[in-house]
Image: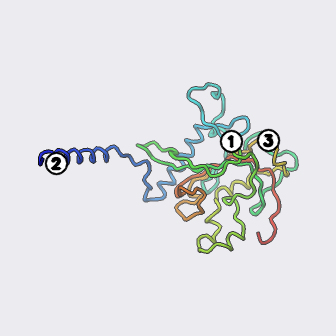
Amino acid sequence: MKKIFLYILAGSLCFSACKKDDEVETYTEPEDISVQNSYDDQAIKKFMSENYLDAQGNIKAFSTTDASDDNEKKLIDLPYQTLPSGTIYIVREGAQPTVEPQTIGPKDILTMMIRTTAYLAVNTDGNVAFAAALPITNTINGNGLPIIDPMYYYVKQSILDAATTGVAQQRSYYEVEGFREAIQKFKAFKNLPSGDPYNLQGVILVPSRAAFARDPHYPYSTQYSLRNYSMVFNFQVYGRADRPDGQ
């Protein structure tokens, strides 16, 4: 009986050791935030090299088996601008308003058709890339109707006033700085009907340092934190309006 117990114990220890050897951590937060910043920049450029815009302006990944996208331009080969925050934006040629284009201000009410995804940049054996994706907003593949003022663009004063904790009373708890900064580089259409077919105007890629970095934030994803997550926005601004005082 004693020998049987020893065999079972040895087998358990061996299984435990093997299990630990097989477990691979997909992400360990770098202690130095500048390292994460570097991962973000590298992963964004890799993402731009692996994706293109389809006929309606949707971000699409290049296929390794279908040759139909071989002649598409990579995002990184399109004209793009980089803001001081590290945010990159691409104004899609031929998709901008030509009749009464509307300038976008920092407090405008915006109506947008938009797909928003958060990505975590990870270094895996020296290969830096986005290794996780969290959908945040998708009106394009959802109900197909534009959204007005998502909170990562602008949070209403009434929400700040109703907040019960100090951090939730700050705009930075909700708003994505890089997106707000870059969206003002685009022009809005003059109040397109919500049922009009979309033709996406471009892309905004925001590194985590211009999103929420490691700060507390509104729980846009109920299951996951957006700590260290970069964000990608693919959108069309259907219209803008002046915001009333107090909002």
Residue found 23% across the figure and 48% down from its top: 13
Q: Is mark 1 on a helix, strand or loop?
A: loop
The x and y percentages for residue 237 are 77, 50
Residue found 57% across the figure and 49% down from its top: 134
Q: Is residue 14 above or below residue 164?
A: above
Q: What count of labels does the image hold?
A: 3
Residue with the most extreme front position: 1
Callout 3 amino acid? Pro
Q: How far apart are marks 1 and 3 (CA)?
A: 25 Å
Q: In which quarter of the image is residue 11?
A: top left
Reading the image, the residue beneath label 3 is: 197
Q: Is mark 3 on a helix, strand or loop?
A: loop
Residue found 75% across the figure and 40% down from its top: 93
189 sits left or right of 225 in the view: right
The x and y percentages for residue 218 are 60, 63
The x and y percentages for residue 84 are 62, 56
Give the foreground label among 1 and 3: 3
Along the line of sight, the residue nearer the viewer: 54 or 76: 54
Reading the image, the residue beneath label 1 is: 79
Give the foreground label among 2 and 3: 2
Give the foreground label among 1 and 2: 2
Circles 1 and 2 in contact, beta carbons < 8 Å = no
User: Dot 3, how many residues are within 10 Å of its Cα: few (below 14), some (14-19), or many (20+)?
Assistant: few
Q: How far apart are marks 2 and 3 (CA)?
A: 70 Å
96 sits left or right of 219 in the view: right
Which is nearer the N-term, disc 1 or disc 2? 2
Query: Residue 150 got which mark?
Result: none
Which is nearer the N-term, disc 2 or disc 3? 2
Circles 2 and 3 in contact, beta carbons < 8 Å = no
Reading the image, the residue beneath label 2 is: 5
Callout 2 amino acid? Phe
